[in-house]
């Protein structure tokens, strides 16, 4: 969804995983081995985000709130949906602009835009080192039950810019009621067992959301 805004993707050729081994920067084990590397990696991601703007896909989804109760479930860790005006956004994999405590998981705070970086020695009030508020590989996805409940209540379901290879997020399709139309927007072919139920819009997010908007408002 955010690739057209210039946000580096993880899995595409030339993406972040080609530059940084996932086990070094996105696992609890990588954090234990080299926390400074992990902090520097996410500091660079935040620097990039501060220079990035929502794309037309983000803006169009926000405008659809004038006609529908739009509930966004995102695997993205950026805040571009919110900056475009979407008011109901559930982040499955965490939020780049926030940090949490290694000691107290309830301690989650927003980083100020003028001081968006954390370093070793930055701690929560109870003395725990601060870490990125990101769900790393091997960690539970706390918001998945809420996402499943939202999916089960959908009247229209759209999947935008995902390969449907990342679980548990890809499994949310199992919760969509059988009579609900599903639209899948992605420039690449996406294989799924739900192919007979899906209306494919083989476009990047900006063009695909525009096409979806035309369909829904016709």
Image (cartoon, helix red, strand yellow):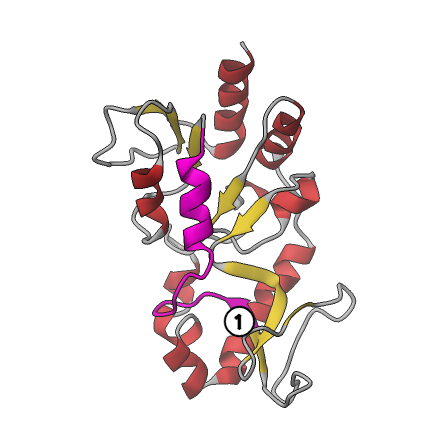
Residue drawn at x 65%, y 63% as measured from the top left? 47
* Residue 33: x %, y % from top left: 41, 87
Number of other residues with Cα within 10 Å of mark 1, as a class: few under 14, some 14 to 19, many 20 or more: some
37 with respect to 47 (left or right): left
Residue farthest toward the right in the current orientation of the protein: 114
Residue drawn at x 59%, y 87% as measured from the top left? 128
Q: Which residues are magenta?
A: 132-154
Q: Is residue 168 above or below residue 85?
A: below
Of residues 152 and 182, the one nearer the viewer is: 152
Q: Is residue 176 above or below residue 141?
A: above
Q: Is residue 31 magenta?
A: no
* Residue 163: x %, y % from top left: 33, 43
112 with respect to 5 (left or right): right
Q: Is residue 152 magenta?
A: yes
User: Which quadrant of the figure has residue 131?
Assistant: bottom right
* Residue 42: x %, y % from top left: 56, 69
104 with respect to 19 (left or right): right
User: Which quadrant of the figure has residue 48?
Assistant: bottom right
Residue drawn at x 63%, y 82% as measured from the top left? 119
Residue drawn at x 50%, y 53% as measured from the top left? 8
According to the image, label 1 marks what residue? 41
Of residues 78 and 102, the one nearer the viewer is: 102
Q: Is residue 11 above or below residue 104?
A: above
Of residues 50 and 160, the one nearer the viewer is: 160
Q: Is residue 6 visible?
A: no
Q: Is residue 212 visible?
A: yes
Q: Secondary structure at mark 1?
A: helix
Of residues 183 and 20, the one nearer the viewer is: 183
């Amino acid at each position: 969804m955010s690739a057209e805004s210039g946000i580096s993707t993880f899995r595409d050729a030339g993406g972040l995983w080609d530059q940084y081994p996932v086990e070094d920067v996105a696992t609890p084990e990588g954090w234990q081995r080299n926390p400074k590397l992990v902090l520097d990696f996410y500091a660079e991601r935040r620097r990039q985000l501060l220079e990035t703007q929502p794309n037309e896909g983000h803006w169009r989804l926000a405008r659809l709130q004038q006609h529908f109760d739009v509930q966004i479930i995102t695997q993205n860790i950026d805040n571009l949906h919110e900056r475009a005006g979407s008011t109901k956004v559930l982040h499955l994999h965490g939020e780049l602009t926030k940090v949490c405590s290694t000691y107290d998981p309830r301690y989650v705070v927003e980083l100020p835009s003028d001081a968006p970086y954390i370093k070793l020695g930055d701690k929560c009030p109870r003395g725990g080192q601060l870490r990125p508020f990101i769900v790393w590989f091997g960690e539970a996805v706390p918001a998945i039950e809420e996402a499943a409940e939202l999916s089960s209540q959908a009247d229209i379901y759209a999947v935008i810019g995902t390969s449907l290879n990342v679980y548990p997020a890809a499994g949310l399709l199992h919760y969509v009621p059988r009579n609900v139309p599903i639209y899948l927007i992605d420039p690449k072919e996406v294989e799924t067992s739900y192919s007979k139920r899906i209306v494919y819009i083989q476009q990047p997010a900006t063009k695909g959301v525009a096409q979806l908007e035309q369909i829904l408002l016709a």
